[in-house]
Image (cartoon, coloured by chain):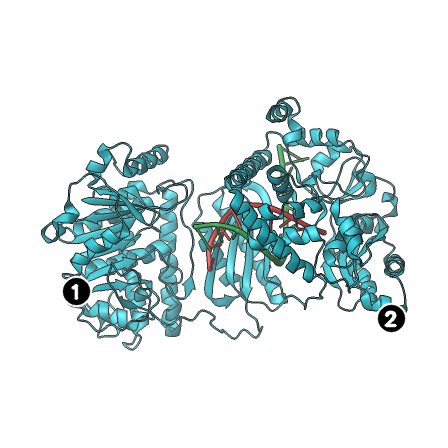
Chain colours: A cyan, B red, C green
Amino acid sequence: MAESESSEVTSRPWQSYHTVYTNAKAGMEGVDKEKVQRIVYEMSKGSKYFENEERKEAFIKQKIENMRARCAKLTAAEISHYQKVADKRILELEATRDLTRIWLHVDMDAFYAAVETLSNPSLKGKPMAVGGMSMISTANYEARKFGVRAAMPGFIARKLCPQLIFVPTDFKKYTYYSDLTRKVFQKYDANFMAASLDEGYLDITNVCKERGMTSGEVAEELRKGVYEETGLTCSAGVAPNRLLAKVCSDINKPNGQFILPNDRMAVMTFISSLPIRKIGGIGKVTEHLLRDVFGITTCEEMLQKSGILGALFSPSSADFFLCVGLGLGSTNTPQVRLRKSMSNERTFLATGDEAFLYHKLVDLAEMLSADMKKEALCGRTLTLKMKTASFEIRTRAVTLQKYICSSEDILKHASKLLKAELPISLRLIGLRMSQFNEDKDGTPSDPTQKTLSNFIVSGVATGRNMDDHISFDSDLSDDHFITELKTDLPIDNHEICYNDFRDPLDSNEVSDPNNSNCLLIYNNDEMEKNDGSLNSKSKAKVNTPEMIGHTLKSYEAEASQLVKIDLDTMNKRTNLSDDAVSSSNQNKQSLWVDDYKCLLCGIEMPSSFVEERQEHSDFHLAERLQKEESDSNPRSLTPKKRFIQKDHITSQSKRKKKHKSSPADVAEDGENWSMGQRQLVCLARVLLQRRKILVLDEATTLVDTTTDNVIQWRIREETSRCTVIRVAHRIPTIIDNDLVLVLDEGKVVEYDSPTELLKNNSSAFSKLVMEFKRRSSSGNNHWGLP
DNA sequence: TACATACAC
DNA sequence: AATGGTGTATGTA
């Protein structure tokens, strides 16, 4: 079996290229599939697209292997258990079977092509396709005889059929004809569901009853009506539910119909031999998966393998498969569904030209905004979609506090998302808005307006307590407090954005494949005196979280309280924390001349604007840090990167000036800070407090590596007389600490000084360091690692 | 929530 | 030379 497969790969390689258009489509019965497949393969071979398809294919193969392995691991007892569960579920589902409704699915025949032929009758009888050289939307039946079909690129179609006529798409026309067909649909079911421009689901139960007609007669009449109204033919399927009706409408295509009676036996017979790929929702991948793992090709087999399916798939997937096996589908008429997202995207010649990409983004933002306004929509989640030159698709999203719809707002956030990805070479950019505001009047109902949980008092060993609101009434000037800074979440409450800023090409972060590895590092300048056990030079050994908790507990005496400053602390809304920070930092000079004017830029802000003032001083702080950072390490920044940063600062300065005239706007500021800048500000504030013990939990994740190195160096300087506990993934962040604890899946795998750990080549830490070196060897090594 | 996949037309 | 655009659902972290 494996041998015949591999010989196919070498002698007839095209057979292993799985395209989307391998499934049987109406009108393609007499086609020489082998030939078509070979031509498609030869036209595609070697292209970037093809390489990406191969990558995806390999990924699916891997998935199949994993599933097979999981299958093989199941014990007999487990299998019988899952079978019992599945049998019970089958009974439950069977009980929901509803044979009282009659559903009709109408599907227009080669809709776009038929419409084009209508408006240009000379196309009649000739092979024709709607679309262009890159993509075909619809092919007429003459073209299908050559293997030309929807979703096929035009240049391949032309190879299959040199005389093929191409007609560009014209959605206005299709919408017009679609409306005509819907007028007819409406006569049979006022609540019909439009599945697309050329498809509809109608519940014809009442029509049949009221007019004393069989469903077949209704279908005939409706199709005749559609033809009279439009001059276009369609096909219909009648069945007790929508899932089956959809399958039925395809059976006698084109210009035909198929009736499946409302009878359980008829349904079961119909379903039994039906290939699963005919069912809507089962596509190329699922078909492949079910065939190669379980040997399932027909719907009937879904029931035969129900136990194992239940064991390997999620409940909702398993349910769907069972329904397929039982021929069950929805019979209800769902209430009008609101749209959940709106998007637009454009493909172009792949380029890394930032000005070009930005320009595309501007266009998309404007178009999207216009579309949103047309439907009076405002959304709060914006997603940037990118397709790289190698066809890899990436999306990056932000969820905002406010609903937006203006092109300016969209562009502002979209360009931030794009900037974080630069440099990058793209062939497509898209924007999508989702999470819409229910009412259109634009009332800014804040859906995630949070109460502030700022200072949370807790012990390390008792775990993190981010959610509880614990009042804080201790003396902040006490130097014995530990300040834990957790900055791996955004600071800004205005704008919650959980972006992954890591660049997969910039491998400065080391983690194991499932990303569960973590390094907990103790830089222990003072701890020695306090607790010798932590500083033990013992060999790496397995440890448990309890032990760590225990060890750390001994510090609780000294650190009478752990002050956790979470991100909200740094937020402008946080009066308490801001007061706390400034009161604990008495040597801090006032920025405000005469308690009114900013010393640095002269902006005027009354003292009552507490939050705005904090925001403003943070801004200057960030500016300073940025400057210091680029001065101290100018060569490590590419000119381009520096330009971006400079640009960032300038845009902020501009915003500040604007605020002069309207102080109320200041509350919005900080919005356009990069996440890295926010982390910088957090860090700076904490360092200023000069604690004896500092916990840095992924404190610099959002800062680029170069800056991170500067920061780490600076932290070491600033904290030479204090104990620093770092939690980090980046090796350079932790390499020169006194003690390293390697965590894997929440457990301490080993701990010792880095030098000791590195002596053992097979220690987890050594492996991480080696992996890090391997990944960074291709790029610049700024880190001066051993 | 963010992101990737799968699917449909 | 060259493989789309729009929208939904779902799984996973």
Q: Amino acid at mark 2?
A: Glu
Question: Is residue A274 rendered to the left or right of residue A780?
Answer: right
Numbered disc 1: what chain?
A: A
Is residue A595 something one can see in this rendering? yes
Q: Is residue A585 above or below residue A389?
A: below
Q: Residue at position x 70%, y 49% from top? A: A279
Q: Is residue A114 above or below residue A186?
A: above
Q: Is residue A152 above or below residue A546?
A: above
Quarter of the image for the N terminus of chain A: give it.
top right
Question: Is residue A84 rendered to the left or right of residue A471?
Answer: right
Q: Position of residue A255 (x, y in %)?
A: 86, 50
- Identify the mark nearer the N-term, 1 or 2: 2
Quarter of the image for the C terminus of chain A: give it.
top left
Circle 1 crowding by C-alpha within 10 Å: few under 14, some 14–19, many from 20: few
Residue pointed to by mark 1:
A560
Q: What label sits on residue A210 in the rendered view?
A: 2
Circle 2 crowding by C-alpha within 10 Å: few under 14, some 14–19, many from 20: few
Q: Residue at position x 63%, y 31% from top? A: A16
Image quarter of residue A485? bottom left
Q: Position of residue A229 (x, y in %)?
A: 87, 60
Q: Position of residue A140 (x, y in %)?
A: 80, 43
Q: Residue at position x 37%, y 56% from top? A: A675
From the viewer's side, name the closer residue of A191 and A319: A319
Question: Is residue A305 rendered to the left or right of residue A555?
Answer: right
Residues under numbered marks 1 and 2 in contact, where contact means CB atoms less than 8 Å apart: no
Q: Amino acid at mark 1?
A: Ser
Determine the secondary structure under disc 2: helix
From the viewer's side, name the closer residue of A619 and A707: A707
Determine the secondary structure under disc 1: loop
